[in-house]
Image (tube, rainbow, N blue to C red):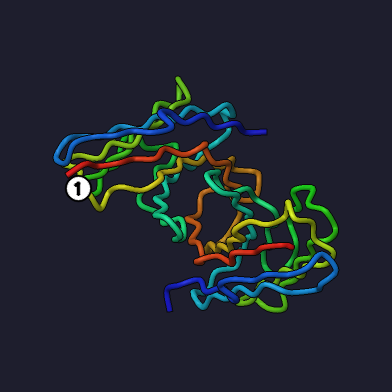
C-alpha cells in the first residue's frame, strides 16, 4: 500500500458538533502531519507527529485536537469550530522527520464545511 | 521562521513551450526543497525535490535547480502538455525543524493546446 487515505471525503458540521477526521498509511512511515488548506492558498502546517508523539503544534486553537493511536493512524478531533475553520484538511506522512529532508506524501483531504 | 516567495502567481504557455517557476527562501539553514503539483480538487502530489548538496536534478520533462548562495530554486518544465495545467507549489524545509515544510504561494500554470 503506497497511499495515504483519509475519511470522510466531505464533512458538514455545526458549530456545536463534535466530529473526527481520520488518516491512515501503511507505508511504515513514522512521521505524520496535519495541514489546513484554504481555497487558492498553500497548505499550512498544523501538527507534526514523530514516532507517535506530538513534536510540533503550530499554535493551533484547542478546538482542534490531534491524536496518534498507533504508527499507522492519525486522527483530528474537532469541537466547537467556527465558520472560518471551513477548509480542506490534508494529512501527510513521511519516513521520518529528523533532519528535515524526507519526502512528504499527502492524502486526498477532507473538505470540511462549518455551518 | 522560514519565508518562501514564489513567482509568477499565474503562468500561461502554449503547448510545447517551456515553463519556469521561481522561488526564493529566507532561511539559509533550509536543506530540502520539494515541488508539488495540485490539480483542482486533488491532493498535492510530489513531482520532484532537491537537497542542498545538489545543484540540479532532472526527471524526464521536469528539472529543478538550486542556488544556495542566492537562496533561490526553480522548476523547469519542457515540452508542456495540457495535462501539466495545475497549481504548482514550491516548499522549503529547515533541517532542525522536524521536517516542517513552508510553502510558497503557488503558481497556476495553464497550458493552452
Quadrant holding the N terminus of chain A: bottom left
Q: Is residue B74 left or right of residue A101?
A: left
Give the number of callouts. Answer: 1
Q: Residue at x 44, y 45 (%)?
A: B34
Q: Residue at x 51, y 39 (%)?
A: B31
Q: Chain of mark 1?
A: B
Left or right: where does residue B15 sit relative to residue A89? left
| Relative image position of residue B52 (x, y in whole percent) | 44, 37
Q: Residues within 10 Å of mark 1 (few under 14, many from 20)?
A: some
Image vertical order of residue A19 relative to residue B19, above or below: below
Q: Which residue is situated farthest in the front direction here?
A: A115
B28 vs B34: above or below? above
Going by the image, does A56 lie left or right of A26?
right
Q: Measured from the top left, where is residue B63 in percent x and y?
A: 28, 40
Q: Secondary structure at mark 1?
A: loop
The residue located at (45%, 59%) in the rendering is B41
* Viewport quadrant of the C terminus of chain A: bottom right
Identify the residue position indicated by label 1 in the image.
Answer: B81
Residue B107: which quarter of the image?
top left
Residue nearer the viewer, A108 or B4: A108
Residue B108, located in which quarter of the rendered image?
top left
> Residue B60: x and y, percent?
20, 49
Amino acid at each position: 500500500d503506497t497511499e495515504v487515505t483519509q475519511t470522510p471525503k466531505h464533512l458538514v458540521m455545526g458549530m456545536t458538533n463534535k466530529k473526527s477526521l481520520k488518516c491512515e498509511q501503511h507505508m511504515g512511515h513514522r512521521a505524520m502531519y496535519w495541514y489546513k488548506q484554504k481555497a487558492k492558498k498553500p497548505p499550512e502546517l498544523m501538527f507534526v507527529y514523530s514516532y507517535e508523539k506530538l513534536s510540533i503544534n503550530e499554535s493551533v486553537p484547542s478546538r482542534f485536537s490531534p491524536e496518534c493511536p498507533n504508527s499507522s493512524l492519525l486522527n483530528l478531533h474537532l469541537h466547537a469550530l467556527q465558520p472560518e475553520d471551513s477548509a480542506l484538511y490534508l494529512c501527510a506522512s513521511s519516513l521520518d522527520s529528523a533532519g528535515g529532508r524526507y519526502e512528504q506524501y499527502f492524502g486526498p483531504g477532507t473538505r470540511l464545511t462549518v455551518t | 521562521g522560514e519565508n518562501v516567495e514564489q513567482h509568477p502567481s499565474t503562468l500561461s504557455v502554449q503547448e510545447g513551450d517551456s515553463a519556469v517557476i521561481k522561488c526564493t527562501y529566507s532561511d539559509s539553514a533550509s536543506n530540502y526543497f520539494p515541488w508539488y503539483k495540485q490539480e483542482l480538487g486533488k491532493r498535492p502530489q510530489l513531482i520532484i525535490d532537491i537537497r542542498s548538496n545538489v545543484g540540479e536534478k532532472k526527471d524526464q520533462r521536469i528539472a529543478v535547480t538550486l542556488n544556495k548562495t542566492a537562496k533561490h530554486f526553480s522548476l523547469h518544465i519542457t515540452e508542456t502538455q495540457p495535462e501539466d495545467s495545475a497549481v504548482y507549489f514550491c516548499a522549503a524545509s529547515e533541517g532542525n525543524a522536524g521536517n516542517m515544510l513552508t510553502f510558497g504561494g503557488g503558481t497556476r500554470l495553464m497550458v493552452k493546446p
